[in-house]
Image (spheres, grey):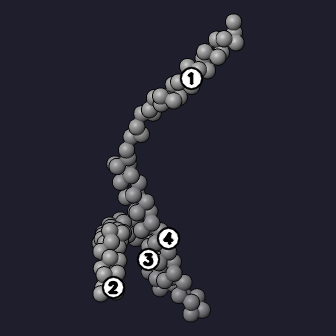
């Protein structure tokens, strides 16, 4: 019975369930970002830029059997996805930015110490 109880305690801890939810949400969010890059950004921005550079079919570029075009294609895709994630996270942070609370006044101890300091200063000036 000890093993089953240990496994139950491990599997149903809050952080394990939170991790599972995070992985599932991350997978779904990854599909959204990939679709945004592949279906919106690539046709609107990347394809015209590649046409202007004369490299419409970048993934087929090769030199002595090394298909460096695949690497360039993956690199460009990564940079696009990273930029989109940066914009999304920056926007989300701006929306959820909390205002800093106003600084609290001095504590009772600090107030008492300030009064003592002021009394000592006034006695030394006399």
**Which is closer to the viewer, label 1 or label 3?**
1
Residue at x 30%, y 81% (from the top left corner): 5
Residue mark closest to the camera, 4 vs 2? 2
Residue pointed to by mark 4: 53
Quadrant in which the C terminus appears? top right
Q: Position of residue 123 (x, y in %)?
A: 66, 11
**Residue 70 in sight:** yes
Element marked by disc 1: helix
Mark 4 → mark 1, Cα distance in angstroms: 71 Å
Secondary structure at numbered mark 2: helix
Res. 80 image quadrant: bottom left
Q: Position of residue 26 (x, y in %)?
A: 34, 70
User: In the depicted view, which residue is nearer to us: 43 or 30?
Assistant: 30
Structural crowding at the residue carrying mark 2, measured as other residues with C-alpha within 10 Å and reported as few (<14), some (14–19) or many (≥20): few
Residues at marks 2 and 3, CA–CA distance in whole angstroms: 62 Å
In this rendering, would 86 be left or right of 6?
A: right
- Mark 3 and mark 4 residues within 8 Å of each other at the beta carbon: no
> Residue placed farthest to the front in the image?
1
Q: Which mark is residue 2?
A: 2
Residue behind mark 1:
114
Within-10-Å neighbours for mark 1: few <14, some 14–19, many 20+: few
- The nearer-to-camera label among 2 and 1 is 2
Q: Which residue is mark 3?
A: 56
Q: Residue furthest bottom?
A: 65
Element type where label 4 sits in the image: helix
> Which mark sits nearer the N-terminus, 2 or 1?
2
The relative height of residue 57 versus residue 102 in the rendered view (above or below) is below
Q: Secondary structure at mark 3?
A: loop
Query: Which quadrant: the N terminus?
Result: bottom left
Q: Residues within 10 Å of mark 4 (few under 14, many from 20)?
A: few
Q: Residue at x 37, y 44 (%)?
A: 98
């Amino acid at each position: 019975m000890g093993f089953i109880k240990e496994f139950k305690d491990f599997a149903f801890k809050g952080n394990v369930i939170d991790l599972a939810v995070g992985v599932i949400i991350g997978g779904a969010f990854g599909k959204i970002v990939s679709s945004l890059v592949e279906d919106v950004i690539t046709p609107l921005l990347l394809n015209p830029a590649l046409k202007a550079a004369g490299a419409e079919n970048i993934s087929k570029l090769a030199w002595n059997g090394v298909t460096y075009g695949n690497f360039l294609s993956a690199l460009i895709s990564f940079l696009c996805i990273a930029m989109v994630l940066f914009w999304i996270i920056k926007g989300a942070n701006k929306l959820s930015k909390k205002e800093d609370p106003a600084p609290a006044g001095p504590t009772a101890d600090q107030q008492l110490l300030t009064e003592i300091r002021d009394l000592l200063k006034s006695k030394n000036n006399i």
